[in-house]
Every structure is written in C-alpha cells, then in structure tokens.
Image (tube, helix red, strand yellow):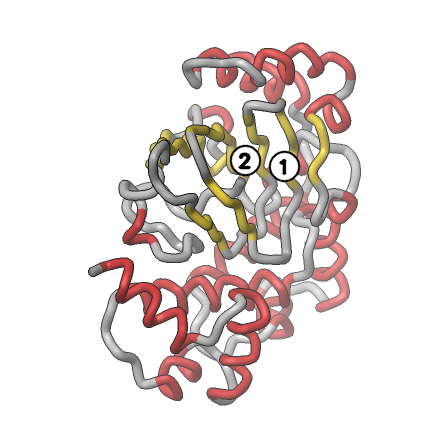
Amino acid sequence: MEESDNVGDDHRGILRPAEIGQAFSLDRRPPPADLADCIDRHWLVSWDLRGRASYRSEVLTHPCVHVVFEPHGCFVYGVRRRLDVRILSGTGFAFGTKFLPGGFSAFCERPLGELTDSVLPLAAVFGPGATALGEIGAGFHEPEEVLDPLLALLRDHRRDPGAEAELVRAVVADMREAPPGLLVGDLAARHSVSERTLQRSFARHVGVGPKWVLQRFRLHDALEALAEGERPDWTRLALDLGYFDHAHFIRDFRAVAGRTPTQYERETARAAA
C-alpha cells in the first residue's frame, strides 16, 4: 500500500481524499533529521470496516520507494507505475516509510530500475540481517516497535550515492515547481547535462525515467484540482498542466486512473457530499 505525497493536509495521489477519516485513517510523522535528505515521511494507514462494506482504496503512485510493514511481513515496494488498488475489509493496517525520489539509492547498491513494479521481502534487499525485522513487523502493535530497528538498519546501510544522486534530487525539486510546458530537454539544459545522462541517472536512482516523473507530477496536480470541487475549464486545465491539448490530457488520465477526468470529478463530488 502506498501513501500520498507531502506531509500535512496535502493528499496528492490519493483518489477521493474526502473519504480519509471515513473509510480509513491516515497518520503521518516526519523522518529523523539525519535521514531527512533521503526519507519523505513515515505513515500509518488503518481501518475498521467491521459490519460495513469493503472499500476500494486507490492511489496514483509516486516515483518513490516504500518500506512497508503489513500483517504478513515487511516488504520493499519499488516505484509502481500503475494505479495502486487495495480492497480494504474487516480490520487492518499498514505502516510504511516513504523515501524521497532518488532517496532509496543511499541504501541500495543495485539500480533502482530493478525494483520498479516489484515487491520484495525486506531481507531480499538488505540481506539476511533484516530477516528478524521482517518477522517483528508481522505482529507489531505500536509503530515504534518496528520504526526504531528499521532506522537503525537504514543508518547501518547508508552510503554516499554520489553526485549523480544529487543531480536527480535537484531535477526532481525543479520538476515540482516546473512551469506548464517544461520538457525533459529543458530540465537537462537547466542542469547542464544531456537528456541521455538524465535518463540514465533517473533509471539508476529513481527507477523510472524523467519524462514519467514529470508526467506523474502533472497528473497529481490534475487530481488535486478536480478534488477541489469546482467545475474546471478542461482545455485550460490541460494547458496549465503542460499538455498540448485536451485529448492528450484525457488519454493520459484515463490510462493511469482508469476513468476519465469527468467521471473522477463526479466521484469526488459524491464522496465530498
């Protein structure tokens, strides 16, 4: 299970955010200062739907790696390019650590492209020494029971990923503030590297290409705009997000969200009501 972006009240990436607190709860906490350059946050999702209908949880995923403790163990989730869908029923929980885009490469020697769309046991990434932590995670009652040993594991495995990782973090930060219409070639020029260099760096330290990351940030902006509840000018919205026309925006939105922007707008209105 993946949690949304940005600590605070921003639920970017979570479909139908008005249902937070109704179908499930979401609690967040910041990372420790010495790991804040690699970790975005820790999060806890829990639900109690006993006597109620199951809930379809959907998240438009982020270009981030997660380490997640669930009732059946602890797993490393690589960047997931498709919509993350979970059916919640009964009672349950998931406690996770969300890394910044490119942040997990400080703890993992293999190219992160090898983790993309994969879910691996913690020990498969960190070695046999992480097996015990995975076993603890299968039955914890308080986040601190697994958070403290996880942070110790990360500190023990931390290494300097080099200037290439710093480049990726700088470009990602640039993408978040990118004006409409900015292209990957523009980003490469702004950071004095070639597009090919940028593509290789993102494959190594993020797991997906810079074009994918830029497009995903645009689609997150679209979800946020639609969740605000005001009927948008679709053509204006598409242009503001950097699309050449309305048709391209609808195509990309439907491909990743499984419905058109208009259909999603109606869903958010029903959820808010």
Residue under the point 43% across and 44% down: 54
34 lies left or right of 63: left
Measured as percent of width and height from the top left, residue 43 is found at 42, 32
User: How many discs appear?
Assistant: 2
Crowding around mark 2 (Cα neighbors within 10 Å: few <14, some 14 to 19, many 20+) is: many
Quadrant of the frame with the C terminus? bottom left
Decide which of 232, 197 is in the foreground and name it.
232
The structure residue drawn at horizontal position 36% and vertical position 35%, both measured from the top left corner, is 49
Query: Whole-percent x and y of residue 161?
Result: 69, 36
x, y percent for residue 193:
69, 63
Q: Which residue is painted at 73% across and 53% down in the image?
A: 203
Q: Nearer the viewer, residue 54 or 123?
A: 54
Q: Secondary structure at mark 2?
A: loop
State left or right for residue 268 relative to residue 79.
left
Above-or-below relation of 169 to 161: below
Q: CA distance from mark 1 to mark 2?
A: 7 Å
Q: Amino acid at mark 2?
A: Cys
* Residue 70 image position (x, y, % from top left): 55, 27
On the picture, is 205 further left or further right than 224?
A: right
**What residue did someone put label 2 on?**
38
Q: Secondary structure at mark 1?
A: helix
First along the sequence among labels 1 and 2: 2
Q: Do the CB atoms of the residues marked 1 and 2 lie less than 8 Å apart?
A: yes
Q: Is residue 133 above or below residue 258?
A: above
Rendered image quadrant of residue 233: bottom left
List the residue tagged with mark 1: 104
